[in-house]
Amino acid sequence: MTLHQLRCFLAAYEEGSLTAAAERLGYAQPSVSEQIRNLEKTLGAPLFRRVGRGVVATTVADDLRPHAERVLAAVEDAQSSVASQVRLETGTIRFGMFGIARLYAGADLVADVLRRHPGVRVELIGTNSTEVTDELRRGRLEAAMIAVPQLESEGLTITPVARDELVYISNDPERLRQPVTAKRLSEATLVMPETTFRAVDSVRIILRQMLHETGRNPQSRIEVEDVESAVELVGMGLADTVIPRGAAEQLLPRLAPDAGWVSLRPAQHDTLAIVHRRDAILSPAAQLMIELATARIQAIAEPIRTTRPR
């Protein structure tokens, strides 16, 4: 039994005519007839009865049809998978990643990809988790890593992979002697990044929830777009800030070497998660980026060991 025989069989079964089956497949009619005869010899049973210019399927053919469809579908899946892998060697890999995540893993993630697939082109897309999520919903991205203050998002599958503590950054050692409470945070002079996305930024959402007990919101004296500028201003002694610990460990030695950090009380955490559209069949490229990005983030932030998507 061969794949060629099964294709000829299905074409004849669906067309009800050997001539029509040959036209559909682009073969000569005698070739299709020969393939079906050979298949009948292999099975030891007739598959069709000739009626006028057409053919009528036997009960054996009825039983064979779903099996033949599954076999050919499996072959097509295998071919598609191999083709995707071939494209992975030379195509473009696009992956969504919110802004601060590039400090954790951006350059290293690209290097990881290029070590495995030196012929690909890599695009890391996004500046804020909300923006990246919108790109996913529009189908412009297959998968991404985002920060999620709440593990709910309609139409998306969210899989937490790590969490990162939010820490208070200051150039004044006196402000770092003990963890910062909600009351102290509400009275602090702050510089906050992500000003364009201030309403939906995960760090600010977490801080607003923390300060709810005081009846106040975090009061920022300075608003900037990028976390690097916020840390530099802290280093100048112009304000303090709250950022994920992973970002602080990356940036303070370079941009604010005299600054330090302390925990909040109670401790607060940003959750980092892999996200993609619900029920999506991810390409090999997307699966590769998920694997590598998760490994990079879990090497820096506290891993969340779970395989159950939300």
Image (cartoon, helix red, strand yellow):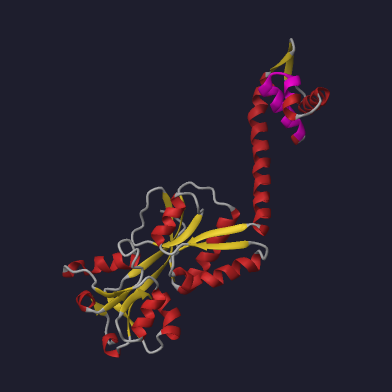
Tell me if residue 6 is in the magenta stretch. yes
For residue 115, above or below residue 275: below
User: Can residue 11 be found in the magenta stretch?
Assistant: yes
Against 45, is 308 above or below? below
Q: Start and end of the magenta stretch?
A: 4-21
Q: Where is residue 36 in the image (x, y as percent from the top left)?
A: 78, 25
Q: Quadrant of residue 63?
A: top right
From the viewer's perspective, tell me whether residue 20 is left or right of residue 227. right
**Figure quadrant of the N terminus:** top right
| Location of residue 180 by image quarter | bottom left
Quadrant position of residue 44:
top right
In the rendered view, tell whether residue 238 sits above or below residue 270.
below
Q: Decide if residue 69 is on the left or right side of residue 277.
A: right
Measured from the top left, where is residue 122 in percent x and y?
58, 63
In this view, the residue farthest toward the left is 215
Horizontal and vertical percent position of residue 35 = 80, 27
Q: Residue furthest top?
A: 52
Q: 103 or 123, which lies in front?
A: 123
